[in-house]
Amino acid sequence: MTDEIRFATIDLDGGLVPPFPINPIQLTNRTRELVCKNVDGIPLRKYTSFYGVGVYGGIATAYSVGCNIRCVFCWVDWSRDWPERYGQFYSPEEVYSKLRAIMAERNFRRARISGAEPTLCTDHLCSILELVHRDRYAFDLFVIETNGFVLSQEPELAERLFQYASRRGDTVGHVRLSIRGGIPEAFTAKTGCSPEFMDLPFRAVEYLWDAEVSFHVAVVIDQRFTSEEEKNIIYQRLSDIQPTIRNNVEEEYLDPYPHALVRLRAVGRIDVTGTGISEKERLAASRMPRE
Ligand code: SF4
């Protein structure tokens, strides 16, 4: 057995099985121990792969390891839940070189870090952003995806991001912050986090706005996960911070990727998964690491 936090499951009464609901601040600290390290002053982070994809009009992607929350609809592979078993450590220069090589090969001008929570290894992320910034005329966009929990605890990170992702211009960085919930019970059901942490991503939005960071908010409005009532609460909270933020929301719908189906089935969401198990879901389940 292990004390590590994997993915949410429910008991026969439909309640979350401990250690869920989780504390995302504690999980941030634990995941950092596993996926971030400093060697001779160089901040390293774990990644599993580097590739190009068609979204955002074509974008080079570094697939990083480790997240500090546990969304039930998460499409990321098992590296999210077993970060100690997946990936290799890379320096900022290595990540940057790999992204630039993909951009050159595919004729892309965009890049991002995806696959997990990029802000977990803060110094590593900012070192990559510094390299991008020095070479910014080769880019028209560098996307920094985040769920906002680290930012909510470390407002100075918003000030650092401003250097590379500024609303004032001459930077190519742009933050995409995902808000997962606006009603406590629904937030917990979606993220696996205790309800008292629901406000943190909104705090992160405030920090980004105040620091003049270039960003937008993404909200899962798929009605299988977010009711009209919850969507309106989220939108109202964003409007209260600044109407522009609400007006620029990216509305997200979810695709049933194989790992998402395994996680959704574990919390009884057969309304989404269906009762039948596809070959892809079976394969994802069979590749789940054993404790
Ligand atoms: S924030 Fe993203 S990577 Fe983390 S659990 Fe949620 S969907 Fe997965």
Image: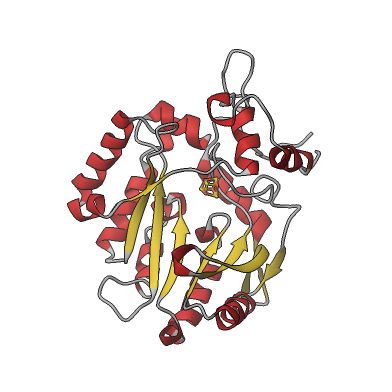
The residue nearer to you, when weighing 185 against 152, is 185
- Above or below — where is 215 with respect to 22? below
- Residue 161 is situated, as x and y percent measured from the top left of the image, at 39, 68
Q: In the image, is 12 to the left or to the right of 208?
A: right
Q: Would you say residue 19 is visible in this rendering?
A: no
Quarter of the image for the N terminus: give it. Answer: top right
- Residue 152 is situated, as x and y percent measured from the top left of the image, at 39, 51
The residue nearer to you, when weighing 271 against 73, is 271
The residue nearer to you, when weighing 257 against 43, is 257
- Above or below — where is 150 with respect to 12? below
Q: Would you say residue 245 is visible in this rendering?
A: yes
- Above or below — where is 248 with respect to 125? above
- Residue 171 is situated, as x and y percent measured from the top left of the image, at 35, 78
Q: In the image, is 99 to the left or to the right of 168?
A: right
Q: In the image, is 117 to the left or to the right of 205?
A: right
Query: Residue, x 73% and y 56% (percent of image)?
Result: 86
